[in-house]
Amino acid sequence: MKKKTRYIHYFFTLFTSIFPFFSYAQHSIHQFKEALYITLPQNYGREAIYTDEFLWNYYNGTVAEPKAGQNIVGKPAAEQSTWITLIADTSGFFRPNPGTGGNLRSPNNPAGPGRLERVTASTNQRTNFQRRGIRTGYLYTTYYSDKSQYAVLNVKGNSAVLINGELHAGDPYRMGWLNIPIQLKKGTNKFYIRGMFVSAQLHFPVKPVYIQTEDMTLPDVVLQKEKEQLVAGMVIVNSTGKTLKDLQVESTTDGKAAVTAVPTIPPYSSRKIPVMINASRINQVGEVTTHVSLSRKNKILDEQQISLRSMEANKPYRVTFISEIDGSVQYYAVHPAIGGEKPNDALFFSVHGAGVEAIGQAQAYKAKDWGTLVAPTNRRPRGFNWEDWGRLDALEVLALAKEKLQPDSQRIYLTGHSMGGHGTWFLGATYPEKWAAIAPCAGYPTLKGYGSADGIVPENGQNEMENTLLRASNQSDVIAYASNYKPLGVYVLHGDADRTVPVHHARQMREVLGQFHPNFNYYEYPGGSHWYGDESVDWKPLFDYFKWHKRPVDTAVHSIDFKTANPNISSSYYWASIIQQQKPLAYSHIAIDRDVENLQVIGKTDNVELLQLDLRIFPIGQTIKITLDSLNEIHYAHQDDQPTIYLQKKDNSWQLVEHPPKDDKGPHRNGIFKEAFNHRMVYVYGTNGNKEENKWALAKARYDAESWYYRGNGSFDIIPDHEFQADQYTHQNIILIGNEKTNSAWSDLLKDCPIRVDASGVLVGDTYYEGDDLGGYFTWKKPASDTHTVGVITGTGIKGMQATTANQYFAGASGFPDYMFFRFDMLESGSDGLVDVGFYNNQWKIK
């Protein structure tokens, strides 16, 4: 595939961001053409902390009706940012001019040179923004409605939007398919759009409930594969004020029907759902038309026609599946080997760059005669930088590929380009036992040294609590545990004229590898830009290098040198596993050798409290001598029924212990807040507060659902607390929104938790923080479960609740510990607003 073909998705996205999709042809559309714009300090980066002076003023009730020439509080101010008038261009986009509200050429300082010191901010906050940059501004526009009515808002280029006071997700990449159902009130409706180069439209759909076809996740019909139970992802839009239940979707393909029950869809929201497709009658290559109808109690609400590709199994094709992360439909792409997929062939695992579809990634390679290539999605073309849920998507797809293709386990190779180059560095260091060799192409190693749309992970915080938050991002800093690459083949490919990811990132890793790695290859492509044709990834010397490398079988590995920052992310290398740490999320290191002939294990550890060793390679009935950290010797009589042992470090000695209680922390459940957004999470919002608190709780759930859909191509159930019944969600994580007073599910799920939150304050262990302006996030082990968790988004009063609204936990590599509390003023003062940040110990207690 040529460069033009590879980036066809990009040009399609650009086209559709400017011209409305055909499905709106019957809709009435209002294009926003006039607006006001202001630049104020704000920072939404790769941190748990965020700041936003506009929202700080807005929630304080000090934002005056915007007028040109006035500042945020409605006064003329020559030395402060003031509202300016903007008119949309012919394509519908508002474009602030450099020096008056935003310089599009300077993403880290949209206000332009010399403007930074003029923002309204405290001295400390100004220091923060000079260090990390102002992100963008707010656009203000209105719509007068002569009646109360439903509509759908479509904004492109924004990171969020306040609609009559309720925060909703944005479309920063201008994809065009994030449609937000809203209720327009009679009179003036106000929109504050966070963004700079944006366009905005209101659509008035003919049908209040309909199928949106702009953002589908579709399978390919592969003639030589199973076709009867295919699954697609489709968006259902509910622009009514009622919760939709008892809906179903029926798909018909060449006369074969399949029916799917639609999960609950809350008022004024959309949801991407699985739709089953039976294509068993398709036996020819070409375009396949599937009729899809949405109905309730035999009444048709909407109908659409969709097209699928029918193809032979010798071309790159898409495979959809139901993700265990959240029950959503995801896909991966396969480029079969020459002659077809064969068991015991090699497997090439290729992770794509930002904005690239997985199928485009697979098409960039020529078929190989010795292996099949598989490309996962990262949940979206930008997704999570192959970290967090992008990492989990890669692991899901790798497991599916191994199950379906049955490759040679010694010949599994990892490669990727750009953001996928980072994904290769990250997945290679995090899971070194899975690969025979890795090959990052045009990649950056860490998000500390290279930022993208969400910025970079800072090196240091402004205080110790912020440093604790940043420690929760340690898994992203692969340079700190680069020694994990030692047993792998590593081939580094980079164009020496790359301006997108400068070649100094590759040279940095060349220097790092040169300090310890015995077998890596490095090549700078002369004159190579970021993308210099398919050879940017499909480079013959790279695949030749792969062919020379095999992953060792388990019994051949006698020396282990392994580091991890979080056992829940990565805990094991062959026969040794780090189960618990002494200091949570600091780096843990084991360097251990086993001598089967002399019946001994010897080594060193750092930041390890509980270690698991698999000793099955040793003869049964023999006594094995174990010495760690030059401390006491342990003598273990190897038994047939106990091939695995556990060693605990306590009081400066190692002790042989029983299997740790599953109720304790470990790889299965380690306590970090982000873990709560797995296992098909369910949001439970509180309805027992006052009107303002209840409204916030539902709005927060909707905002997170929109963000999760946009970033992660996913969805989850949203239910009120009075409908929650624990026995119906036994195998799912729960996200609670509210506090002890406002959410009735709190007492059942958190009765043993050492953190309490009510209307007057927060109790963390033995420490009490008083105030009605406290907000926070924390996690707790789910009752009666060894693996599931409860995540809590909470506040003591409406101010604290509002301060938790931004979902920074969905930003790739952002660090969240077990618990984090802050004052409302964090929105203005940043890390100075933190109150308490920390971790439970391994027994889930707060010291």
Image (spheres, rainbow, N blue to C red):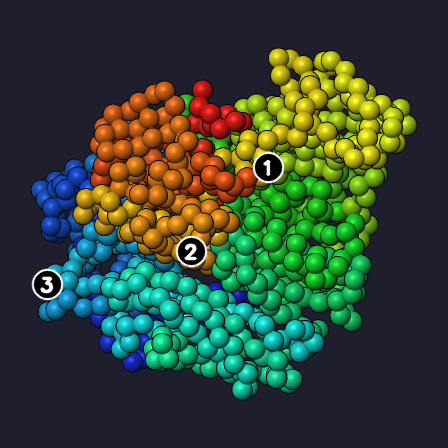
- Please give left or right for residue 302 compared with residue 427 in the image: left
Identify the residue at horizontal 24%, vertical 76% (top origin): 28
Residue that mark 2 sits on: 716
What x and y, as percent, mark residue 621? 87, 28
What x and y, as percent, mark residue 36? 18, 55
- Please give left or right for residue 525 compared with residue 764 in the image: right
Identify the residue at horizontal 43%, vertical 57% (top origin): 715
What x and y, as percent, mark residue 147? 12, 69
| SS type, badge 2 | loop
Labels 2 and 1: the sequence-earlier one: 1
Give me the C-alpha separation between circle 3 and circle 2: 34 Å
Q: Nearer the viewer, residue 803 or 702?
A: 702
Residue that mark 3 sits on: 187
Q: Nearer the viewer, residue 313 or 297?
A: 297
Give me the C-alpha separation between circle 2 and circle 1: 24 Å
**Relative to 531, residue 467 above or below:** above
What x and y, as percent, mark residue 569? 58, 40
Q: Residues within 10 Å of mark 3 (few under 14, many from 20)?
A: few
- Say which quarter of the image contains residue 806: top left
Q: Specify whether residue 224 is in view.
A: yes
Q: Nearer the viewer, mark 3 or mark 2?
A: 2
Identify the residue at horizontal 72%, vertical 13% (top origin): 631
Q: Amino acid at mark 1?
A: Pro
Q: Specify whether residue 500 is in view.
A: no
Q: Amino acid at mark 2?
A: Phe
Labels 3 and 2: the sequence-earlier one: 3
| SS type, badge 1 | loop
The N terminus - image quarter:
bottom right
- Say which quarter of the image contains residue 759: top left
| SS type, badge 3 | strand
Residue that mark 1 sits on: 667
